[in-house]
Image (spheres, rainbow, N blue to C red):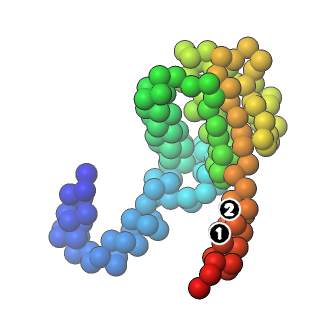
């Protein structure tokens, strides 16, 4: 609800700078977990029984499943689901939890492959009707390419 922004400014006497700090530095996973915005730290705390870490994890996975589900509906299905980037590449817990709700599509995750730190691999079982891929984002390459483009363009 975007009205929360003006409500906070009015009722909590927050100015734009403070509101920006709250929204961009103290909200999200950090705000929910009370620990960190780093999924690795949240997962470790969750496994130690921290209820706020569990809530942050569950909310993150719920939103991920909702996003995947809406894309599946828009596309009329999918041949593959791809996990990439920091959390997608490195969190077997997130991948497993996200995929667990798509078994009705015939998706079957190979738990051994999922937990073996896969990179550029298919982690679905051979029988799965939907492939599940873990792909390295290679963000450093994208940054280097963009730097090269900027440095070599004609002035």
Q: How far apart are labels 1 and 2 at the CA level?
A: 6 Å
Identify the residue at image location x=56%, y=25%.
78
Q: Do the residues labelled 1 and 2 touch (CB within 8 Å)?
A: yes
In the displayed structure, 63 sits above or below 1; it is above
Residue 75, given in percent of the width and then of the height, sits at 47, 28
* Residue 68 vs residue 6, the one in the foreground: 68
Residue 112, given in percent of the width and then of the height, sits at 80, 29
Residue at the bottom extreme of this rendering: 155
Identify the residue at image location x=25%, y=63%.
5
Q: Is residue 128 left or right of residue 78?
A: right
In which quadrant of the rendered view does residue 124 lie? top right
In which quadrant of the rendered view does residue 95 lie? top right
Task: Tell me the SS state at disc 1.
Answer: helix
Residue at the front extreme of this rendering: 154
In the displayed structure, 115 sits above or below 12; it is above
Q: Is residue 62 visible?
A: no
Task: Tell me the SS state at disc 2.
Answer: helix
Image quarter of the C terminus: bottom right
* Residue 29 vs residue 141, the one in the foreground: 141
In the displayed structure, 68 sits above or below 4; it is above
Looking at the rendered structure, the number of numbered marks drawn on it comes to 2
For mark 1, what is the residue?
A: 146
* Residue 90 vs residue 144, the one in the foreground: 144
Identify the residue at image location x=43%, y=60%.
27
Mark number, residue 33 = none
Q: How crowded is mark 2: few (under 14 residues within 10 Å), some or many (20 or more)?
A: few
Identify the residue at image location x=75%, y=30%.
123
In which quadrant of the rendered view does residue 150 lie? bottom right
Q: Can residue 6 be seen in this view?
A: yes
Residue 3, given in percent of the width and then of the height, sits at 20, 57
For mark 2, what is the residue?
A: 142
Q: How crowded is mark 1: few (under 14 residues within 10 Å), some or many (20 or more)?
A: few
């Amino acid at each position: 609800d975007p009205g929360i922004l003006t409500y906070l400014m009015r009722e909590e006497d927050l100015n734009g700078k403070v509101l920006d700090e709250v929204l961009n530095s103290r909200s999200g996973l950090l705000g929910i977990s009370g620990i960190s915005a780093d999924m690795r730290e949240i997962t470790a705390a969750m496994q130690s029984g921290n209820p706020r870490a569990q809530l942050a994890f569950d909310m993150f996975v719920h939103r991920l499943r909702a996003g995947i589900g809406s894309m599946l509906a828009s596309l009329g299905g999918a041949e593959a689901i791809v996990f990439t980037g920091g959390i997608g590449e490195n969190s077997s817990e997130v991948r497993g939890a996200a995929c667990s709700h798509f078994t009705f599509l015939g998706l079957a995750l190979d738990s051994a492959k999922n937990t073996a730190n896969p990179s550029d691999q298919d982690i679905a079982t051979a029988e799965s009707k939907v492939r599940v891929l873990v792909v390295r984002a290679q963000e450093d390459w994208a940054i280097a390419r963009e730097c090269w483009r900027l440095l070599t363009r004609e002035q």
